Image (cartoon, helix red, strand yellow):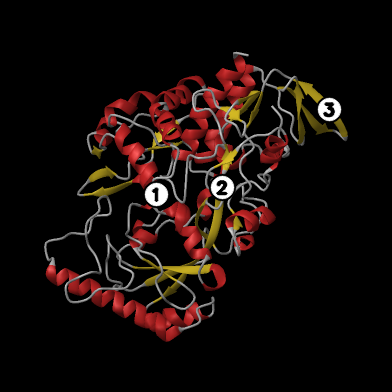
């Protein structure tokens, strides 16, 4: 295995994830066999975990991708998801756990999972990559760090090796097969501007600084077909104070700021610009980074009151993790936000008052609705007597219980969606005419055609495993 990064950056973007894996499953009992530390019976009996069906997984990818994802690729990912998770747990010893802190809320004394995705990894991406590194060591795999790939070697129209740069010299490695797993181009500001559009040089890189599109250059040189959403990417609400060019390996995913469904987001003008309650968080977070980037100045403020502050994830909003802007009144909060980039204090105050009034009107019409963050509860800003231009469709609580807290967020780009055309069953890279390039395979973020515009959280790591297994087995069979 070769990697252009130094060993201390091992793991690519996987290291910076929460370790979330989405898979088809039959409910709680189906997954207990792959969990590292099974919760005690007193906890298990309080878990509500609905099965996540094949049909639901397929529908989620297609719905969020506006019907554009390759249906054969999607079917392959979904139909092999459960087996891939089992392989990771049993063969790689990935320490899967139930994602209580990210995918469940305690309601009426019960842990209710929501949004289809229930699995994470102990210690998140750090734990995931540690498990893979141990598995590679057990298998005797040699890894060359600080070794960028320069070109693929082709003999008789087949891949027969790879030229790399190691220790100041070009070295040709002979091989029957090469598997490309070099990530997207999200860390390349020039390519972001070229493919994602104007302004994307301002996005923060959430993960590794080494995903700069090198793998695509290798593939293009041998005639690979490029497909998918080259204008699209996974981008999230990210700490505006985070570094621009790479994630931090100590805090990794803690710079994510995913608490917006419990409050509101406003731009520099003090205006809301998304429906924070449109869907469950893991169906919206990967597209809201783009929405933030498109706002004046490329930033926004997330705002909550004391009703929900305690429900925000400690790993994202805890003391010492993020700069908190706190006030006892709207007016004081506005003054403090002006110091952080708010340009229209009066419009901001109007936004808050109109938001609250819309919720009060809806509550008057629907007195029996109850706030429940584990379901789409229907608590909204839209009533017969008052409607906001941009609604909040679910989980709409008035901001009327001081203290108030705000956090400044920017766009964090995670990975890009455009990639290479592959044969779904073998993960072989395809040429422009649809024929396989013998000996060349692909997995991970380099696979094109799977995600468009948005994606259901946890699908990326599962996709990498599904097509990585296929690529490895195909390569081994040559």
> 280 and 388: which one is in front?
388
Callout 1 touching callout 2 (CB < 8 Å) = no
- Where is residue 437 shown, x and y percent of the image? 64, 26
Q: Residue furthest bottom?
A: 346
- Where is residue 453 shown, x and y percent of the image? 46, 51
Give the mark nearest the N terminus, 3 or 1. Answer: 1
Determine whether the residue tagged by mark 1 lies in a helix, strand or loop: loop
CA distance for labels 3 and 1: 45 Å
Give the mark nearest the N terminus, 1 or 2. Answer: 1
Callout 2 touching callout 3 (CB < 8 Å) = no
Determine whether the residue tagged by mark 3 lies in a helix, strand or loop: strand
- Where is residue 356 shown, x and y percent of the image? 27, 75
Kindly identify which residue carries mark 1: 66
Report whether residue 318 is seen. no
Tell me if residue 475 comes above or below residue 54 in the rendering: above
Kindly identify which residue carries mark 3: 171
């Amino acid at each position: 295995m070769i990697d252009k990064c130094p060993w201390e950056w091992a793991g690519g973007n996987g290291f910076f994830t929460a370790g979330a894996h989405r898979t088809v499953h039959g409910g709680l009992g189906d997954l207990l066999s792959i969990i590292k530390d099974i919760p005690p019976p007193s906890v298990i009996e309080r878990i509500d975990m609905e099965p996540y069906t094949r049909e639901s997984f397929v529908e989620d990818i297609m719905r969020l991708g506006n019907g554009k994802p390759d249906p054969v690729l999607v079917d392959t990912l979904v139909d092999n998801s459960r087996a891939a998770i089992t392989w990771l747990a049993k063969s790689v010893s990935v320490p899967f756990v139930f994602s209580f802190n990210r995918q469940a809320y305690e309601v009426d004394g019960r842990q209710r999972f929501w949004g289809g995705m229930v699995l994470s990894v102990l210690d998140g991406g750090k734990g995931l990559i540690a498990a893979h590194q141990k598995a590679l060591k057990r298998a005797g795999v040699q890894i060359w760090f600080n070794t960028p790939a320069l070109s693929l070697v082709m003999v008789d129209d087949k891949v027969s090796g790879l030229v790399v740069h190691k220790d100041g010299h070009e070295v040709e490695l002979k091989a029957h097969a090469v598997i490309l797993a070099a990530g997207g181009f999200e860390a390349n500001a020039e390519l972001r501007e070229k493919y994602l559009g104007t302004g994307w040089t301002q996005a923060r890189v959430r993960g590794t600084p080494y995903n700069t599109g090198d793998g695509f250059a290798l593939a293009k040189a041998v005639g690979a077909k490029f497909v998918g959403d080259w204008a699209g990417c996974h981008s999230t609400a990210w700490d505006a104070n985070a570094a621009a060019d790479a994630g931090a390996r100590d805090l990794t995913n803690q710079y994510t700021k995913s608490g917006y469904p419990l409050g509101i987001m406003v731009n520099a003008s003090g205006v809301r610009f998304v429906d924070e309650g449109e869907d469950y968080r893991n169906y919206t977070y990967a597209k809201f980074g783009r929405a933030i980037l498109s706002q004046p100045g490329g930033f926004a403020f997330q705002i909550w009151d004391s009703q929900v502050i305690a429900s925000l994830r400690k790993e994202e909003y805890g003391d010492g993790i993020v700069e908190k802007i706190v006030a006892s009144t709207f007016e004081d909060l506005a003054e403090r936000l002006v110091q952080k980039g708010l340009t229209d204090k009066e419009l901001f105050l109007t936004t808050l008052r109109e938001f609250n009034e819309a919720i009060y009107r809806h509550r008057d019409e629907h007195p029996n609705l109850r706030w429940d963050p584990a379901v789409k509860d229907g608590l909204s800003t839209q009533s017969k007597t008052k409607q906001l231009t941009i609604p909040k469709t679910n989980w709409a609580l008035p901001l009327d219980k001081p203290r108030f807290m705000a956090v400044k967020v920017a766009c964090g780009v995670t990975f890009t969606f455009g990639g290479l055309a592959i044969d779904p069953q073998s993960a072989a890279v395809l040429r422009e005419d649809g024929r396989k390039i013998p000996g060349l395979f692909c997995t991970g973020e380099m696979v094109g055609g799977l995600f468009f515009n948005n994606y259901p959280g946890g699908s990326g790591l599962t996709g990498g495993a599904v097509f990585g297994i296929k690529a490895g087995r195909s390569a081994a069979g040559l």
